[in-house]
């Protein structure tokens, strides 16, 4: 059994750093009234579409088209919710979207972090070429792949199945590039070498060292991926039907008819947006912090 | 037994012509503290990384405890390494950092806790065990890095300039503590530094490298008193040895407009018939003589250190106006003997303190 000989050594403490002062050192200027005005206007412009969706979803078509239009939501919102749920399987669509967006998010974050780590830190032949190839796929329009992709899922008998929506989007070139760029500057080579000297395998280094350090970027990528997957319409409308839709496919079903019921569509949109809003409210601070941390480090 | 051997070990980086480490042959005895020193780019860190298994060995072999580990991964070599910037895992506590290697080796938790606790006690880290590296000072991080190496109880410690990120005062205070700690533990240690003062004060032996080639490996005193070539002579010692090349004349060597007396038989061996010889003498080996009695030099800069003074001077007859080359000769003298800049002093080199080198090869000939 290994033993350690106790040797009392008085290693000196480092010199204490300069005492911390409250607030920042140096001059800081507070924002002037013009800045505040600009920020308020920008916020209102950004938030207005969401607010209008809520307002329009709680009135009738005639009320929306009236002059002046209503600017406050009404109690009819919940009646319109019920109508939306009657006319389209919004409930099923929300569950499907959660499954699809969740699977795509987890798969994308995991795969892109793995690939980004490999491209950023592992030495292998063809690293540069493969990375260029991956980035090059970003220049290929998604629409070009739709027909062969549909032929493939039809052969696999996956039409109207959720896996047809999940699997093609499980890895994104943007995600690989994003994680690679983050890890190049955020993950020192010495940490990986320390892990190797300590006896960790490459996969153990990935789980124990890389993932904790990459967490902010993974959170950002996860949020962006979730939003993209949630809002995706082009491929789900082809691969799925109204019997097994995602939220966007279900909302498209709401819009059909001789006279579109805009209030019902807006109510359905509110219902479909709620889960994303909840995620952003819960994780928003972390996401923004992760973005800013990346910005400062860069 | 934990000896370390480099057997003709060579490493050449891709797309470079010159090897970073060129046929290194070096043996480290069990329990020895060996320091690898040299200027930037000399191959010392590459040599250490080859020993750690972090760098490929293109040819030759590396042995630890008599076992060839050339192709083995780092985890199989039973080594522990302290990195220049400590490489602490930022998301783990001090305790977790120190215990990570043991956890990977499937050591029981109780044993991990015991060994971490013992190492923390040795290094005075007990109050810091639950902190994360970002909450530690540079000196504390350095101790955690040391603790992470100690808990593993390896055959060999490898240290890659662990003091270079500390402030000057802390560096001076810490280096002797590290040397004492390692000596008490009795573990074979290979230590890399670019600071020759650190090398001389810490190592049992010091290996000087230049351009990937081992110049000399010897005890600090031997390196200081008997450098094997001009490079070692000029690298070891602070201020550096005075090294001058002059023409052999009757009675000595012409330096500038004067002649430094040197025994004839030494000159014949050193010049090899070329008529020129390279002399080396340390600043403290110089005696100030009376006017006209010795080699005249003109003082250009005086550094007062309290008890001593350093006189930076140019050979008489040489220009003193070149700011990029303010001195040919550095003299250490008593502070009371210091003269003001612009004055001429005459100097002699003490007996047996003159080093002679072949001007063509730079190799030591006689002293």
Image: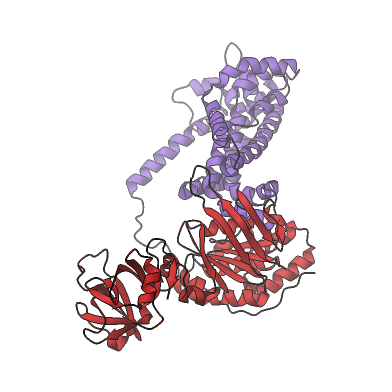
Chain colours: A purple, B red
- Residue A149, percent across and down? 65, 18
- Residue A124, percent across and down? 61, 39
**Residue drawn at 33 percent across, 48 percent down:** A33
**Residue drawn at 65 percent across, 76 percent down:** B122
Nearer the observer, A90 or A282:
A282
Nearer the observer, B303 or B364:
B364
Nearer the observer, A196 or A26:
A196
Would you say residue B250 is visible in this rendering?
A: yes
**Residue drawn at 35 percent across, 76 percent down:** B264
Nearer the observer, A186 or B187:
B187
Residue B104 sits in quarter: bottom right
- Residue B137, percent across and down? 53, 68
Instruction: Determine the residue located farthest toward the top in the rendered image.
Output: A258
B101 displayed left or right of B41? right
A234 displayed left or right of A40? right
B46 displayed left or right of B3? left
């Amino acid at each position: 059994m290994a033993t350690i000989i106790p040797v009392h050594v008085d290693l000196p403490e480092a010199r204490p750093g300069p005492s911390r002062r409250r607030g920042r050192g140096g001059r800081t200027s507070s924002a002037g009234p013009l800045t505040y005005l600009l920020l308020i206007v920008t916020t209102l412009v950004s938030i207005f579409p969401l607010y209008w969706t809520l307002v329009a979803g709680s009135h009738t078509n005639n009320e929306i088209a009236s002059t002046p239009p209503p600017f406050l939501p009404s109690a009819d919102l919940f009646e319109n919710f019920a109508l939306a749920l009657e006319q389209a399987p919004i409930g099923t669509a929300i569950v499907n979207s959660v499954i699809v967006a969740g699977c795509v998010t987890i798969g994308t974050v995991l795969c892109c972090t793995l690939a980004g780590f490999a491209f950023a830190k592992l030495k292998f032949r063809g690293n540069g070429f493969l990375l260029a190839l991956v980035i090059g796929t970003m220049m290929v329009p998604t629409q070009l792949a739709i027909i062969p992709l549909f032929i493939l899922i039809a052969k696999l008998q996956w039409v109207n199945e959720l896996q047809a929506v999940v699997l093609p989007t499980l890895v994104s070139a943007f995600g690989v590039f994003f994680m690679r760029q983050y890890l190049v500057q955020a993950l020192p080579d010495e940490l990986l070498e320390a892990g190797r000297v300590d006896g960790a395998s490459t996969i153990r280094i990935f789980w124990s060292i890389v993932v904790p350090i990459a967490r902010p970027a993974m959170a950002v990528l996860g949020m962006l991926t979730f939003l993209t997957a949630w809002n995706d319409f082009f491929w789900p409308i082809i691969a799925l039907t109204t019997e097994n839709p995602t939220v966007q496919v279900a909302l498209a079903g709401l819009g059909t008819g001789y006279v579109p019921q805009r209030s019902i569509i807006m109510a359905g949109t509110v219902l479909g947006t709620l889960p994303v809003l909840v995620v952003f409210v819960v994780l928003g601070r972390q996401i923004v912090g992760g973005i800013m941390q990346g910005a400062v480090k860069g | 037994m934990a000896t370390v051997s480099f057997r003709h070990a060579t490493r050449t980086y891709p797309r470079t012509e010159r090897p970073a480490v060129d046929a290194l042959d070096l043996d480290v005895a069990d329990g020895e503290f060996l320091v690898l020193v040299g200027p930037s780019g000399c191959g010392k860190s590459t040599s250490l990384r080859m020993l750690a298994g972090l760098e490929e060995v293109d040819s030759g072999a590396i042995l630890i405890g008599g076992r060839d580990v050339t192709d083995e991964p780092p985890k199989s070599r039973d080594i522990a390494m302290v990195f220049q910037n400590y490489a602490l895992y930022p998301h783990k506590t001090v305790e977790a950092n120190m215990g990570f290697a043991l956890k990977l080796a499937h050591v029981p938790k109780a044993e991990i806790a015991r060994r971490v606790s013992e190492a923390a006690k040795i290094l005075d880290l007990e109050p810091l065990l639950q902190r994360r590296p970002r909450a530690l000072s540079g000196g504390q991080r350095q101790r955690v890095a040391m603790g992470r190496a100690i808990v593993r109880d390896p055959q060999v410690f490898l240290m890659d300039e662990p003091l270079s990120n500390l402030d000057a005062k802390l560096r001076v205070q810490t280096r002797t503590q590290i040397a004492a700690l390692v000596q008490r533990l009795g573990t074979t240690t290979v230590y890399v530094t670019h600071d020759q003062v650190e090398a001389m004060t810490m190592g049992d032996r010091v290996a000087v490298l230049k351009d990937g080639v081992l110049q000399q490996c010897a005890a600090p005193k031997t390196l200081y008193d008997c450098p094997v070539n001009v490079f070692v002579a000029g690298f070891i010692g602070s201020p550096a040895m005075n090294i001058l090349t002059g023409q052999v004349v009757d009675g000595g060597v012409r330096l500038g407009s004067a002649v430094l007396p040197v025994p004839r038989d030494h000159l014949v061996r050193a010049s090899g018939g070329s008529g020129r010889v390279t002399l080396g003498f340390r600043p403290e080996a110089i005696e100030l003589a009376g006017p006209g009695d010795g080699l005249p030099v003109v003082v250009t800069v005086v550094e007062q250190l309290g008890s001593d003074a350093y006189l930076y001077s140019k050979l008489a007859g040489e220009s003193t106006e070149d700011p990029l080359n303010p001195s040919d000769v550095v003299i250490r003298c008593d502070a009371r003997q210091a003269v003001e800049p612009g004055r001429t002093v005459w100097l002699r080199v003490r007996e047996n303190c003159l080093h002679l080198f072949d001007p063509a090869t730079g190799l030591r000939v006689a002293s």
